[in-house]
Amino acid sequence: MGRMILKRIFLMAGALVILAGTSCAVNPVTGRQEISLISEEKEIEIGRNSDPEILRKYGAYPDPALQNYISSIGEALARNSHRPSIAYHFKVVDSPAVNAFALPGGYVYVTRGMLAYLGSEAELAGVMGHEIGHVTERHAVQQLTAAFGLQLTSMILSAAVKGGGEFSRLTDVLSSGIINGYGRGKELSADRLGQDYMFKTGYDPEASVSFLTALQRTEGDPLDPVSHWLAGTHPYASERIRKAQVHARELDPQMLVKTRNRERYLSQINGMVFGAGERDGLLAGRRYQNRFFRVSCEVPEGWTVRTGRDTWAAETPDKKYRMQFRLEELKEAVDLNSFAFRMEQGMELNHGELLSRGRRNGMETLMVRYRAASGSVILGEYLLRDRVGIALYGMVPEVSTGQLTEEWRRVEESIQTLSESEAGAIPLARIRIHQVRPGDTFSGLAMEFLKDPKKAKEIAEINGMSPDASPALGSAIKVITYY
């Protein structure tokens, strides 16, 4: 998750904390009294107020059947948790990152990127049970209380009087719990609780072991390299696996519970988007195309480019010049000036100098130059087409724009609208369930479905296997294909 969104979430949390007062609360899992700054009511309010921000940032994955499936499993787990009385909310977010996370008060999210790597319903139950464990032990609340306890008075005064200088640093501490995990002890505790809840719900507790082992084979997700679920990036990955193995045997010594529901799980994710989604856009060479917004443009040649939901960003190898392209779905009709003003506020830009306004490629355009306090120059162009807003920014750390102006103009002149048929023809990678045939290998399947045998590792990893392994004849496995 991005730090800025989490910072806003915990700024809301902090405002509630200031009003909540200090009290003691019983830890629902341990039964011990703990000092707490947040009541259960306020904890739930934090999650409820933060949920729209999460969905604005990542979006709900547009598959009602999959959403209902995830919710049904989460609700069954929650009924067997230490806090069955609160209202839980389980959502699939439209992100390719391999992650799952929980906000205070019972709001649990799992990315479609995570779902691609799970091999059964039982593994899904283990992941969701882990996140429910963070909620039941109130790990976010504990971290918030501990952080405030360092300098409670000065924090409150800073937030209330000075506009949040010290408090902003505090929110960084809080958001790191969701981004990096809550520390070795709390993550291991959530693992254990997740196994408890899945076992009580009727799932094989060893499924958590198989999933953690499968994740350890990956090299880490470049889209979300600090996710606390990427076991391979943890120094204590082997410890998590070992403890999960031990606890699974404690729960089921005779290994009698075997329920994994692999076939049902695979049927639910068949056809799910994998990797870049509709709103992430597709980058082929220098050409960027966005299927959802029906927009295309050229990216700067020789620059490092990263695409994301509704955006791409680029920088020169020396990091001297930067460019950012942003798309926005407008819920209501607005004029170009209003759109530009809102984008300026989001980017914290002011004192702009109007360079030009006009029309190009059927779109209204507005071009502005900004001078930052640091002396850097930012060029901005805003374009409007029906309910689609486009913003292109170019940044350089000194007054002379030089190379930036040239490259920026190439990009802004290339921005075009795609027809519905052109947008529909942009391929999306999707998960497809495949019955293994005689002679099938991961390199052969990569060639068949992706026209690239080098993608064998990618297909093997989403099945929790090595690319050199042979999938079992007749078994159902996941492959990746475009359609």
Image: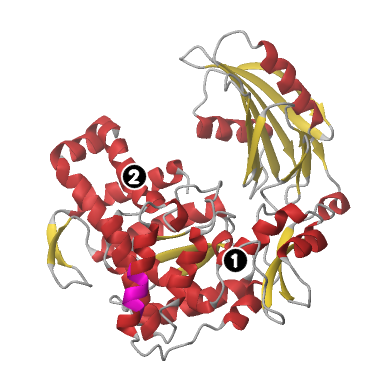
Label placed on residue 465: 1
Please determine whether, in this image, residue 3 is positioned above or below residue 359. below
Of pointers 2 and 1, the one earlier in the residue sequence: 2
Please determine whether, in this image, residue 393 is positioned above or below residue 91. above
Please determine whether, in this image, residue 375 is positioned above or below residue 452. above
**Which amino acid type corresponds to the residue marked 1 in the rendered image?**
Met
Q: Quadrant of the C terminus?
A: bottom right
| Lateral position of residue 469 relative to residue 250, left or right | right
For label 2, the SS is helix
- In the rendered image, which quarter is residue 32 located in? bottom left
Question: Which residue, given by chain and number where applicable, does mark 2 sit on?
Answer: 11
For label 1, the SS is loop
Depth check: give the residue in front, 128 or 448. Answer: 448
Q: Residues within 10 Å of mark 1 (few under 14, many from 20)?
A: many
Give the Cα distance between marks 2 and 1.
42 Å
Magenta stretch: dominant secondary structure: helix
Span of residues in magenta: 243-248
| Lateral position of residue 207 relative to residue 103, left or right | right
